[in-house]
Structure formats: C-alpha cells, structure tokens
Amino acid sequence: MNRKADAFSHRDLMTAYNSKLISASDAAGLIANNESVLYGVFLGRPVDFDSELAGRKEQLFNVQVTQCAGLPAASPTTCCDPSGEHFTCNSWFFDTGNRRMGDKHLMFYTPCVFSQLQDIIGSDLFSYDTYVQQVSSMDRNGFFSFGPTNVNSLESCLGAKRLILEVNENIPRVPGGSEDSIHISMVDHIIEGCNTPLLELPQGKEPSDAEKKMAALLLREIPDRACLQLGIGGLPNTLGELICDSDLKDLGIHTEMFVDSMVKLFNMGLVTGRYKTTDRCKIAFTFALGSRDMYDFMADNPVMASHCGRYTNNPSIVGLNDNLISINNTLMVDLFGQCCSESAGPRQISGTGGQVDFVNAAWKSKWGKSFLCLSSSYRDKDGALKSRILPMLPEGSIVTTPRTLVDHIVTENGIAHLKGKSTWQRAELLIGIADPDFRDELVKNAEKMNIWRRSSRIAE
C-alpha cells in the first residue's frame, strides 16, 4: 500500500469517513478480470461485498478469491461458479462449508502453518490486489477494530493496493495486544449497513465417554500456574468444565483461538495470568469463535490481548511461558507416531492451522507439554468399528505433525509419551492406548514393519 496517510484532526474524522463510503455493489464493481481478492479470515470475512461480487459473475473472468473458513455455509463466490471460469476460490483453513465445496472441486486448500501466514502474505510468494474485511464501527480516534479476527489483518491491509472495510456493528471492539486495528487514513473504501449477526458456534453436544475419560487424564497433567492453549471441540470444553471444578489456581491463557470455556475459567477466578512471562495478567489470542455472550465479554475488556498470528503462534514467544500445556485434536496416528490432523486420505477436512506451532512452543517451554488427542476408535457410516491408531497412515493422508515433533498422544485408554522414544517403544506405547479390539492386529503389523521388540505386555 503506497497511499499517503492523511492528517486528521478529531473533527475531520467523520468528514473523511463519509467521503470513503461506498455501496457493496459499487465496491464489488471495482474488481476487474484477472485480479486477486483476499478476504479477512474467520469472522472477518465480508458478507455483503461477497454477495455482490458473486452477482457480477458473468462480467468477470479468472478472479482469485482467497479466504479462511469462518461461516457454516460457503461464501456466494464459492457456490456460484461450478465451471470455475469466473472465480477460483482458495482457503487457508477448511470449515464445514469449505470442505463441502472442496468435495465439489469448488474450493482449494492453501497449505500453511499459522505462524507463517503473515510472512507469506507480506512476501512475493503471494500476490493480491484487493483486501476486504469486516471490522467494528470506527471509534472516536478514527480506528476500526479487527475484533475477534486479528491473525493477518493488519498485514493484509498494509499490503493491499485497494483496501475495503465492511463495517459491522455486531463486531466487538477488542483492545491490543498488537496490530489489532486500522486507522481511517489507511482505508480506501468503507461499506456500512451490513450488521450481519456474528456466527455463534452451536452449544456443544453431550461429551462422549471417550472425551470424558481423556479430559480426566489431561486434568492430572495440568499444574497450578500452567499457561493453557486449548483447541476447539468437545474435549477442550469438557476439560474446561473439569478445570472449573478443580482446585487449580493462577492459570494463564496464551492461545490461537479464544473459546467460551476460557470465559468461564476467568469469571470463576481460576485464570489470573499473574505468572505468565508474556502478556502478564492478560489473555492472549489471535481469533475467536463462540457464543454471543463470549463476544460481549471480549468487547472493550482490558483482560483481552488481541495479537497478530505472528505473535500468538510464534513458538519462541509462547515458549517463554513456563508450564505451557497445549491440547489439540488429531484424526489418526500411525505406529511411527505420525499424526494426521487435517485430512481423510487425500480429502481435506480442516487445515494445518497452529497445531505444529504450539507443539513446538510446548517443547521450548520450561516444563511444557503438548497433547494430541483422539478417540481410539470410531464407527463408520455402516456401523463398522475402525481404529484411529493405524500401522501406517492411509495413502494420501497429510502428516500434520511429524513424529519428530510429537510429544504426547492421548486416547481414552491412556497417554503415550513418545518424545525421545525409539520406533519399537513408540509402537508399544501406541498399541497400549489403542482400542483393545485392535491391539493383536496392530502387534502383528508392527512385527511385519520391523518396529516390534516384544509383545508380552501388550498381548496378555
């Protein structure tokens, strides 16, 4: 962005604001053939602009649209062009809507580790012409908050040839942190009047027996003064409830994703952050997805520290905190300890996200631990029982976290500590936490793979 920043007095802010107002239709009309458009990630994804851009389909050819999950339904630009002649849509991370579009060959995944996303966007590796993001309303100093979507927002604003903001009054203004807002002097166009209700994640289902057992195992691994990073899903929520009923104290939070369970932990006084090394007495995060109550909690709350992803996911920064406890989900693991957390064979399910960042961070943290969690088995659509611990990952599966980085693997049957273990030790430990119905078969496969030394303990 090479535009010259304007000088504004307080009384000039509204004049500048009004001069930059544009309808969503006119904003979409600025996009030309062969251009690339980048959207804000998660709750920063524009709504009205995207609908109007999809409405121009027949006028446009070869427009690249890059986004990153955020809503249960795919964006209109993704759905409107089955031929791919007008729009090619890409995503840094798949949610349900993106996954469905990927199955239809309408959405393509862009692999990245979250800590590197800003650097990719700011480099010659990735080019784009226009950046569009939903933001809060402007404050009295002329700043628009990125609210629950920091991540790569400022980097994307500063690198865009054309910057368009879509104002949504439902987006909470969240303080910093770092790189948490953009001034009106840096903005080209403003769309207002959208005010779409923010996505609220549905209330969690009743936790499964496996999730309850894993949460109980994990609770024993959390000491007083631990710094927590919890992923999304039933297990972290279940663990959060157990922590609330525990006698743990002075916990801290440094996380990629801020979720509802963290609000409860703070309100009950279990999270103080006083022993954190970074962002002391604050909750550090880079994006949030949850309930309306959670978004209201975040609004203008000094305990929140909204940081860019280059900060929250930097292992060297996160690892400065002692007793970092990182808990994330994985889909399957093989007997070598390789974890696939994002695909079913070649089918993209989610994305790499920040899992590897926090596994690395926990390794750097004094007394830190990382846990990758999965139920030991599941039933497929035909009701057949299948193991999630496999001899080898299925063909086409993406290795999200390599065996050299994996620390702990957790199932409802126990915790396997793999760091520093040999191949035969890993196989034995993993078979020990597998579904008992599959252990004998796994032993036989381990023997064929030449990673089995003895079977007396497992085969009893």
Image (cartoon, rainbow, N blue to C red):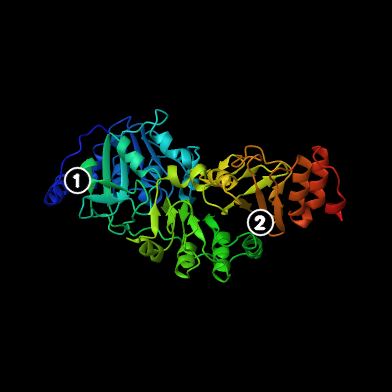
Disc 2: which residue: 375
Foreground residue among 335 and 185: 185
Q: Which label was assigned to residue 332?
A: none
- What's under tag 1, amino acid-wise? Ile
Which quadrant would residue 427 be assigned to in this image?
A: top right
Q: Quadrant of the C terminus?
A: bottom right
Q: Is residue 43 left or right of residue 321?
A: left
Task: Note whether residue 225 is visible.
Answer: yes
Q: Position of residue 228 (x, y in %)?
A: 53, 56
Of labels 2 and 1, earlier in sequence is: 1
Q: Secondary structure at mark 1?
A: loop
Point 20% across, 55% down: residue: 140
Q: Nearer the viewer, mark 2 or mark 1?
A: 2
Amino acid type at mark 2: Ser
SS at circle 2: loop
Q: Residues within 10 Å of mark 1 (few under 14, many from 20)?
A: some
- Eyeballing the image, is 164 above or below 247? above
Graded by Cα atoms within 10 Å as few (under 14), some (14 to 19) or many (20 or more), the crowding at tag 2 reads: many
Q: Which residue is mark 1?
A: 22
- Please provide percent x and percent y for residue 426: 74, 45
**In this view of the protein, which residue sits in the foreground, 147 or 317?**
317
Residue 454 lies, in percent from the top left, at 86, 46
Residue at the spot 52% in from the left edge and 51% down from the top edge: 321
Task: Tell me what residue is drawn at x 22 percent, y 34 percent.
Answer: 3
Q: Is residue 72 above or below residue 184?
A: below
**Residue 73, horizontal then vertical, whole percent:** 42, 52
386 relative to 89 in the view: left or right: right
